Every structure is written in structure tokens, then in C-alpha cells.
Amino acid sequence: MEKLQLVLTDFEGPIDLLLHLIKESKIDIYDIPIADITQQYLDYLNNMKVLQLDIAGDYLVMASTLMSIKSRMLLPKAPDEIEEADDLEDPRDELVSQLLAYQTFKRVVDYFQQKETTRARSFDKEPSVPKSQISQFLVPGSVTINDLAETYQQVLKEQVQHAPRTEMIEDEAISIEAAQKSIMTQLLPHKRVSFKSLMQVGHGIEEVVTDFMAILELVRNQDVLAFQADLKSELFIELRN
């Protein structure tokens, strides 16, 4: 192995330094030549001392760990240990696990840092499509909530015009569930009915409001379909299959 020309840079810790040495020397992380990498690591620490740079305790702990692994691998094995060599744990295994875990997290951090840099160059903007141009993006026959609201207002105006000036106040409970059942009953024989006819023009305003809420609920539950041929045509309610 050629002697590594070390460039003193900032490392995040001894594992970061060790991984740097392994990559620069193009060493297989699963088969680290522990004697060579230990010497390179110690050379790096010695260079820091020559430059009178402080060495954190973590770096010294890693140095002692490397020297311990080196000594365990260099010491001669007893005859019984040679026979059981296949079953013995490699002294480097724990170090390799630490290096692999650190390498994985380092890649994840680098990935998110790149995403953050890219995202910082982007700016969000609210959509600014004029209302007059929205129709060109709709599928033919589509119905917007504004269409239902406009038709609903027309029905209410007609209701006010046809309503008697004096009305008897009746204590009658009006439920959306009952209105839904009534609407579905009207749709069953015809499958398709105009929105206005379902609003029961001529009844009380309470019935009109309840029917409108019932239709919205049926559309939301996908029991019926609201559609119109174009944006100016009459609105129809159709029973879904």
C-alpha cells in the first residue's frame, strides 16, 4: 500500500477520519488491513501534534482501539485456537459495523442537505388563474360548486315570489335524511331529473334548503351525479348505477 499523503481537514470525529482514510486508500471496508490503517491513523494524529493542534479524546480512544485490534490479529494463536479459527469472531467486526452505520447516516445527511439546497432556490406562488378562464380546464359536463349555488339562489328567488304573504307556522321536523330518501324515490323511475324540479318549488323555504343540503350530501356520497351540457345549460341530477 502506498503511503497516504494526508491533508489536514476538519472531521466530525474519529469514525469520520477513519472512513476518509479507508476511502482514500481504496480499501475494502469488509477486509481492512488493520496494521496499515492503524499506522495511517497514528500518522495523522502525529501531524496534528506537530502543528500544535488539539486532539480530542475520541481520537485517542479510536487510536487505542485500532492498536488493540492490531495486536489481537498479530499475536500468534494457540493450537486449539487455530483449529477453531472458523468459529472465532473477527476482531474487526465491531469496527466494520460502526463504519457501515456511520457511512449510511452520512449518505442520508448528504442527501437531505442537497434537497435543502435545491429547495432553498425555489419559491412558491399561489395560483393566479383568472376565474373567467377556469372553464377551459374543466371536463365538458363538469359542475362546480358555484353552479349549484347559482341554481340554488334562482330557486330561492322563485320560492319567495310564489310564497304566500301569510303562512301558518307548523311544528314539523324536516330532516336531510328524509329529503334524501324523497329525492332518491323521484330519481328511481326517471334516473335523471332537473335540479330545479328536485328543489320542490312552491313548498316552504325550509324544504328548499333541506332539499339542497340533501342533494349536496348525495353528491358527496357519490349516490348521484350533478352535470350540465355546458356552463349555461340547465343543471341535472342523475342516479349513479
Image: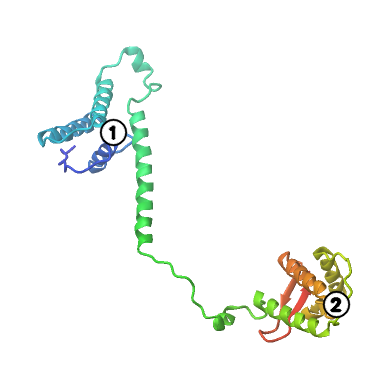
Is disc 2 surrounded by few (<14), some (14 to 19) or many (20+) residues within 10 Å? few
Q: Residue at x 16, y 33 (%)?
A: 43
Rendering coords of residue 203 (x, y %)? 85, 77
Location of residue 197 (image quadrant) = bottom right
Q: Nearer the viewer, residue 67 or 139?
A: 139
**Residue type indicated by callout 1:** Ile
Label 1, secondary structure: give it.
loop
Q: Residue 40: image x %, image y %? A: 19, 34
Residue 73, located in which quarter of the rendered image? top left
Q: Nearer the viewer, mark 2 or mark 1?
A: 2
Q: State which quarter of the image contains the N terminus.
A: top left
Amino acid type at circle 2 is His
Disc 2 target residue: 203
> Seen from this angle, which residue lies furthest front?
166
Q: Nearer the viewer, residue 88 or 67?
A: 67
Q: Is residue 185 left or right of residue 232?
A: right
| Up-down relation of residue 165 to residue 105 (above or below) | below
Image coordinates for residue 217, horizontal then vertical, percent: 74, 66
- Look at the picture and state if 69 lies above or below 190: above
Secondary element under disc 2, as helix, strand or loop, is: loop
Screen quadrant of the C terminus: bottom right
Residue 214 — which label? none
Residue with the most extreme left position: 50
Crowd band around label 1 with a 10 angstrom C-alpha radius: few (<14), some (14–19), many (20+): some
According to the picture, the residue beneath numbered tag 1 turns out to be: 32
Disc nearer the start of the sequence (2/1): 1
Residue 2: image location, x then y, percent: 16, 39
When the figure is inspected, residue 27 is found, relative to residue 202, above or below; the finding is: above
Residue at the spot 87% in from the left edge and 77% down from the top edge = 167
